Image (spheres, coloured by chain):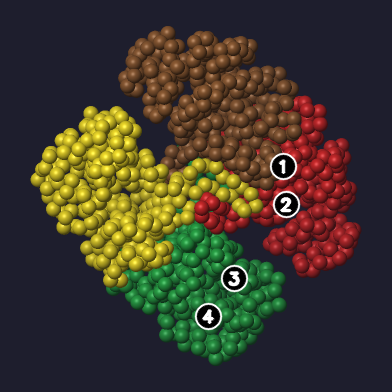
Chain colours: A red, B yellow, C green, D brown
Amino acid sequence: MLDIAVIGAGRIGQIHARNIAAHQGARLVGVADPDEAAARRLADACGTSVISLDAAFAAKAVLIASPTPTHADFIEAAANAGQAIFCEKPIDLSVARVEECLATVRRAGVALMVGFNRRFDPHFAELKRRLDAGAIGRLEMLTIISRDPSPPPPAYVAVSGGLFRDMMIHDLDMALFLLGEEPVSVYAAASVQVDPAIGTAGDVDTAMVTLRTASGRLCQISNSRRATYGYDQRIEAHGATGMLRAGNVPVSTVELANASGITADPVLPFFLERYAAAYRAELDCFVTNVASGPSGDDGLAALRLADAATRSAQTGQVVAL
Amino acid sequence: MLDIAVIGAGRIGQIHARNIAAHQGARLVGVADPDEAAARRLADACGTSVISLDAAFAAKAVLIASPTPTHADFIEAAANAGQAIFCEKPIDLSVARVEECLATVRRAGVALMVGFNRRFDPHFAELKRRLDAGAIGRLEMLTIISRDPSPPPPAYVAVSGGLFRDMMIHDLDMALFLLGEEPVSVYAAASVQVDPAIGTAGDVDTAMVTLRTASGRLCQISNSRRATYGYDQRIEAHGATGMLRAGNVPVSTVELANASGITADPVLPFFLERYAAAYRAELDCFVTNVASGPSGDDGLAALRLADAATRSAQTGQVVAL
Amino acid sequence: MLDIAVIGAGRIGQIHARNIAAHQGARLVGVADPDEAAARRLADACGTSVISLDAAFAAKAVLIASPTPTHADFIEAAANAGQAIFCEKPIDLSVARVEECLATVRRAGVALMVGFNRRFDPHFAELKRRLDAGAIGRLEMLTIISRDPSPPPPAYVAVSGGLFRDMMIHDLDMALFLLGEEPVSVYAAASVQVDPAIGTAGDVDTAMVTLRTASGRLCQISNSRRATYGYDQRIEAHGATGMLRAGNVPVSTVELANASGITADPVLPFFLERYAAAYRAELDCFVTNVASGPSGDDGLAALRLADAATRSAQTGQVVAL
Amino acid sequence: MLDIAVIGAGRIGQIHARNIAAHQGARLVGVADPDEAAARRLADACGTSVISLDAAFAAKAVLIASPTPTHADFIEAAANAGQAIFCEKPIDLSVARVEECLATVRRAGVALMVGFNRRFDPHFAELKRRLDAGAIGRLEMLTIISRDPSPPPPAYVAVSGGLFRDMMIHDLDMALFLLGEEPVSVYAAASVQVDPAIGTAGDVDTAMVTLRTASGRLCQISNSRRATYGYDQRIEAHGATGMLRAGNVPVSTVELANASGITADPVLPFFLERYAAAYRAELDCFVTNVASGPSGDDGLAALRLADAATRSAQTGQVVAL
């Protein structure tokens, strides 16, 4: 039984707290949040208590779901307290700060797992399993399409680190997860198509990235901050002996046929619905593997790619890695 | 090279005449029709001549695409002239007349092929091929869904012989084609749901039939004179080791995704589009197999089933065969 | 907060107990089962206690998930104790006994809900919602395909009441739920195709049923005790202005494309997986509507249809209702 | 009635000759080919004569389906003879030679149509029609996936001009057709994944390209010389109010469901099958619009893009246009 404290009672903290409360191998020891009302509501809903930050750092494990700027400090505090750590992505928007933070984690000898939830999506995990099992022979090309239903508010955009660090980092992590090789170059083309306010805030809302590995494997990623038909999350892996793809999940299987055609449901609206199972599986992985010590290095690798993609989009040039 | 005369320049005669003109192993020797203008238009379009009925019966083979009440007489005339005969279904609406007609054909020793075009649909033919090849082991259940896009005019309904002889006869033939055993009982439930005028004309527009074979294989057929989404033609065969199904063909593969969902095209609108390839394959079968002499018995077996289904729907009772 | 005791710690009792434990508006007050070890394991897993039958009948509500032959007695005991009752289907295999039992419930003035879980399946519920909202105009035809992955053990078959009362009763209930009218006749064709031992036990494993309502609506149901590709659960409703269908749910969205074609996952293996959400929604309905008092009449109507279908299959004749 | 001579009796010449022979508004006046036996076979099959090159250039129109190195010379000869010209792509592998050739065509004032057949594919044409009709609002992103079933022989690779000019040129033309704006930059990543002999011949077999237009529209193209599941031809257009996609066409609609899952047919094997209707529609466009004079400029624009993509792949840098 792993005792876990949750820091952060926002949208993502609520998911994790409920999952911990329902997990047979974990115990939710409390919820800490400067917004006491929010902490109270979540604690009540999960049958646990509101606790202080100090108490949170005294548990056997901590799950950090607070705002991004606090992540690195909290990870270091937890590492110094000898806790097993689960932290929502990203560790930080600065590679230097992430490296510093990971060094602290290594010195402390604690486990750190960064919340790349998509690796745990049952559909993507099954694709990965079959890829590893040789279902399509040697992987040659990867296509990742990932579109949010609608853009975040401009206020969020301004502190988000930009589309590549905030949104595409998930797809870059997925590319690293599936490619089986390090990219050697990245090219990003990006523009503002959805909302001029995003451009005013210094960001883009539409982007396409190409990765190339040393052996010549190629990967394309397509991102938009808008998809009218739901949260679009698709992966296609093309190999020597076949092609594997994982598609979207519809709201229901109901179809209506009439003179307009045959209309299937939109896809699940956003990450809370699409990745509900992924969040449960991710937590289960943390609880199960806490002893063997995940290192948090995934968070660094994906951030480095996101930095390179940002640079490529800004300069219009290919960036060598 | 098989010389074929076409009798009938209507909708179905046009299909056959064009297919004969384009077939490498056949020659269209002319078109006969009491409506001379129609015959002329079709003959011109196919690069052939308008001919008399007598001339049509002098060709090596004849394709009868005239109105139903003329079929049996024309078949007999052609049989007596020693021609190979392709006749659109049905031979006649009376089983007794069909038996008489087939006896004439047998005595004459000529080949007679009845136009059950669906057996030649590439999708259904492929399903049949795999069924015969053992893809699903022993067949246990068959489901046939067949819906016209819209009801025929009441004037046609009155002379059509009724839904079972006019429309479901195709599905009954398909059931005979696929079941691999003779049905021993038939039950039909039918009603007027689409157009009261059809009821006034003494017919039904909605029907469900169940067939049972001696070994216990079961078959359901579902017919409606209305389908808002196109010409609905589906077959599903369930067996000991799997299930095979052949679905509808969409107008195009284009899909539109938006907040309403993901909308695929309606299915092909009616038999001219859906069975264009079937009509070509059917003709090719006639040209290729004319020597080995198809017997026309299929036309009789399906009509007997249609008669039994009609009786069942009228009495509300199961009919033993 | 509704206090609910669970009677029965078997497969279906486990589902319900866990769902009660996780429901925000319910409290699991204990688990009763003559098999004390099973009761213990389930109580432990749900953080509750093993209780006696007497204690179970002392709770505010009871959920009966014990073997079928005990259902009616337990319902009557619960009714006499003034409890709200949720009982797994069927109430009993005898219509007379069910009528007696429902009379007791009525006299006691308590709520009784029978577990027809499929009405709560999100896909079927959505189909029903759109049907009621007029998405396809007036309903004309209904097609229900329902196939178990594999036959039950012959020992179970012998006491099951037969395919129509044990398996098709769910589809008959769904037909009643969707047709919007009472059937006036039923015809059933059935046979043994899957396992001769089922025939030896006096039952069938393959069946097709046709229902007809007073206004002429038609419904076909197709049942098999075998489906190699998973638990096959499909509904198609055809109406004046369109067609609605609810399909199967695949294990994952992953597809493999190679020279064999494009292979999607099998459908969810059986009811535990396919109807997991339905069981939660069903419980939620019970908890939410307990005051307004569901009557349990659904259980009787479906059983009467199952009896009629059984009679039809045995006599080979149509049964008027 | 347009008199057309065909030059070239190879695979593509056969398609065009048969389509001309079957077209109601065209007449096939003969087939010219240095391989007399091939010319004879094709002429016989189409009911026309073998003719000399001189005779071919004397017809009202000429269809050039000879080997690529002859295209530009034949176009100029035809232009100087005042013929309407249909030429298979590419006009030439050298931009300079194409420009020269187009200048000749302009001076002669004749019509030149280059065979970009995919624009006439019913599925892609329907996507284009809806895009133009505003079905998805302003276009933002385009994704084109195009994979051949298997690589061409190395001997062909050596004279093909390379993957970008030989294969991707079709996709680049499709991008130009759909984007509605000129690209301002192109980036290509390419490698040898399928067959080392292709690398030895100085070419690549796997490539991904990104195009960017002035207004920030982005387009990704994915090419492979191998697809085990057939000829993979897909387009997806993402816009402000929706997404349109056109998918592959399966060999048949038959699906097999068993314990391995639900297996649909592979997609149509190669361009002869997939684009059969496109070739007919393309010819029809030529016959119908010959008077209004298509200019052949499309051939130049796509070739310029292919050249830029080749340069980008060779240098690893983005190429501005």
Q: Are marks 2 and 1 on the same chain?
A: yes
Q: Residues within 10 Å of mark 1 (few under 14, many from 20)?
A: many
Q: Amino acid at mark 1?
A: Ser
**Residue drawn where x is 42% and y is 81% of the image:** C94
Looking at the image, is mark 1 or mark 3 nearer the viewer? 1
Q: Is residue A148 above or below residue C201?
A: above
The numbered dot on residue C296 is 4
To which residue does mark 2 refer? A286
Tally of numbered tags:
4
Q: Residues within 10 Å of mark 2 (few under 14, many from 20)?
A: many
Q: Amino acid at mark 3?
A: Glu
To which residue does mark 1 refer? A224
Q: Disc 2 is attached to a residue of which chain?
A: A
Nearer the N terminus, badge 2 or badge 1?
1
Looking at the image, is mark 4 or mark 2 nearer the viewer? 4
Q: Disc 1 is attached to a residue of which chain?
A: A
Whether pointer 3 and pointer 4 mark residues with C-beta atoms closer than 8 Å, the reply is no
